[in-house]
Amino acid sequence: TPSASSASGDIKGLIELAVSEANDSYVNSGIDIHLNLVCTLAVNYSESGNYDTDLNRFKTEGDNFMDEVHMNRQAYGADICVLILNNDAYCGLAAVISANASSAFCAVHYDCATGYYSFAHEIGHLQGARHNLDIDPTLGYNHGYIDLAHNWRTIMAYPAGSTVRIKYWSNPDKYYNGYVMGTTTYENNARTLNESANIISTFFYRPTSAGTLVRNETWFLAHDLTGNVYVPSGISLTLKPTAIINLNGYSIISTGGTIVNEGASITGVAAYIKTNSNVIVGYCGSIQSACNAVASGQKVEIKPGSYNGGFSLNSKSDVTISGYGTTINGTINLNNNSYCNLYGVYMPAGQVYISGGIGIIVMDVRSDLGNHSMNIQNTTNNAVYGLTATNGDMNDFGVNIYNSNGDICRSSRIENQMVGIYLYGTSSYNVNEDYFCNNGYDVDAEGGAYAYLLHNTHSSISPLSAYGNYFLADPNSVVECSSPSSLAKSNTASLSMNNQSEVKGTPAGDLDRMYLDLIHRTSQDTALDHKGRIEKYKTEYLGIAEKSKDELKKSFNDFSKLKSSLSLTVNCLRYLGEEGSLTSYLNELLGMSDLQAYSPYIKKYLIPGLISRNDFTGAIALCNEIQNSKDIDKDLTCEMLYEKGLIHRFYLNNNTEAYRAFSSITAKYPDHPLGKMAIGQISDMPGIEVEKPGLKSLGNTSEGFTCSNYPNPFNPSTRFNFSIPSDGFTELKIYNSLGQEVKTLVSDYLAKGKYTFEWNATSYSSGIYYYFLKSGNNVTTSKIILLK
């Protein structure tokens, strides 16, 4: 205190001497303790004149008396705190005998601290040492010792007669001037201090910088994390207003414990993890770390701002990610989640992928990438509300949907795309109350997919800018956008389309209508959440599934109707999450001899179930089995390649194998609708390392679309140097003078840039040949001469 400092004349020297004397006493008495003075602090405090009052104020945190003591205790990791007073009522007072971390405080009169050893005496109390047995009759071996015959006493003993306090502790194994200094039964302070030393030495600590907290902690001062800090169940972390915490890219996360922020400054927060009642249980240095740590029933709230790179949410349940006011410069992957939500992110050049799972809601998301802004695959009962995808071009799909069902509605805005929403496989979607403009086609549903259209604004209404299996619920609900697309009116979108087949009133068509009407009513029942709607409409879905099964039994000789009926059954059962019932039904069909020819087409519906059970090896094996089956069409071949690509990319994190699968579609079936979807997948996969024999990249700076070879004429090798202006599927082929293809040099999806390829024509005869280079819509050809 200021009073003690003034009275002592040299308070710092006095404190250092008191510590030195205590350490000497430990050495003298065979005690394995060494005091380390970590901090001396002048407190701004006027003494009350009462020891109990002053000591209580000294040890109490947050009472506005000497609170700087607690901040510095943490900063310097002090186990014990001693207050030096100018009060001679006592020589000292300890808060307690046998202290814990919160009570390891004592007060000492400056004039007794040294020479009389009251500094060491009061610390001895905190370690469990007691006065001599005459003064303190408590049974135990922890008392001080008095030798009246020889006129001395140890540090913990009170005055008796004319005895002098010596710099020793009671110890029956030690002698002073040839006389024993204690007894085994009652006077053995040395034993007490040695036994408590390890406990005292862990009373306080520097704040945890990385790892799991093992005790309650309070952070007062500047603190830099060096790793993630976890607060487990039963532990609390308190962040004081004076604390300045730098996450350094790491996170503070509750794994069951309590985080109390009383106003600390925390820098480097990218996202918060909150309970549904908005209690913060995580301060995260990256969005990804928040997504990894968030638990069921919690939400990730991204701090407004711009972020480089995307993030993934994997195998979570009942989690919401909210990103209003954020810009995400990367891709967002939602993989195999249940009843999770993504709200309010803006992506200038990123995509959203929803892969697997059930009950996913995406709302108020804007993507300016244009190409494949939203990709939904093998997902059940999901909804997209308020999507904005308006920055496409006439080579782009805005939304890709593969083997999924749900809704795209409530003011989604999709413009300037070749196809606004493309559905394939067993997909069935409500598309209502959305705005389409300047698209080649607003909606295209193929390969067994269905779309239910209602109350939309379309790019064109005469003819309607929709294609494939769509059902226009109310023709009067259609409105044409203010800038109708001439491309939509002429239906010249560059897709390989089947004949347009608006759902009509055939028996199968009636079931289709029933199903589409049901999923529309389900989505409009906004009073219930996803789970509530499934339960409410379960009986109707099961009814349609049973009727569809009956239709299938009548269609053994009609492959088209069989596939349609099977697809509808699968949609109904998968919408309800009845994966077990669906698997049993599919296995029942596979056991029917009349359906053996169709078994590959039945088996493909088993793949999502394997994925949902995380049996990715089994799913890939089944894809390979189906792909190697005899007499399957190119649609199923492309589906199996696409499925393998999805599994490798989104579940096994193997972009190299994913690339091989997707590029097999683009190379062998470039005009197939899944070829376009595969290109979108490839274009968004970073860090692909795939060997392309003979082909070398010369950088991503393009010189437009050019090609040349040197030497020409040549024998036996010539080098082609070519440049492509944009990412795309690229072919470099050699033809003979009769126009026959003799060699494919390059057939791959390539990034924008310059390339070189050396062709060794040793096995070819002399003559005139032609090279043919195509990339996107660019084509060039020229004559080359092989002379031997």
Image: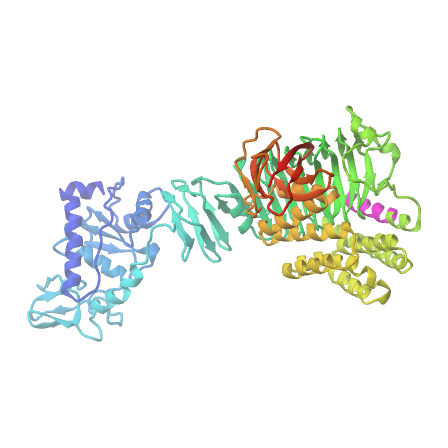
Camera sees residue 280: no
Q: Position of residue 237 (x, y in %)?
A: 43, 50
Total labels: the figure holds 0
**Residue found at x 77% / y 62%:** 581
Is residue 88 positioned above or below 30 on the image? above
Q: Give residue 548's quadrant in the image.
A: bottom right
Q: Which of the two residues, 609 or 679, is positioned nearer the viewer here?
A: 679
**Residue found at x 67% / y 30%:** 391
**Residue found at x 25% / y 61%:** 125
Q: Position of residue 28 (x, y in %)?
A: 13, 64
Q: Using residue 62 as the reference point, say whether residue 785 is left or right of it.
A: right
Q: Which of the two residues, 307 or 625, is positioned nearer the viewer here?
A: 625
Q: Which residues are magenta?
A: 513-525
Q: Which of the two residues, 502 or 599, is positioned nearer the viewer here?
A: 599
Q: Give residue 554's quadrant in the image.
A: bottom right
Check if residue 327 falls in the magenta segment: no
Q: Give residue 619's quadrant in the image.
A: bottom right
Check if residue 524 falls in the magenta segment: yes
What secondary structure characterizes most of the magenta part? helix
Q: Position of residue 771 (x, y in %)?
A: 65, 36
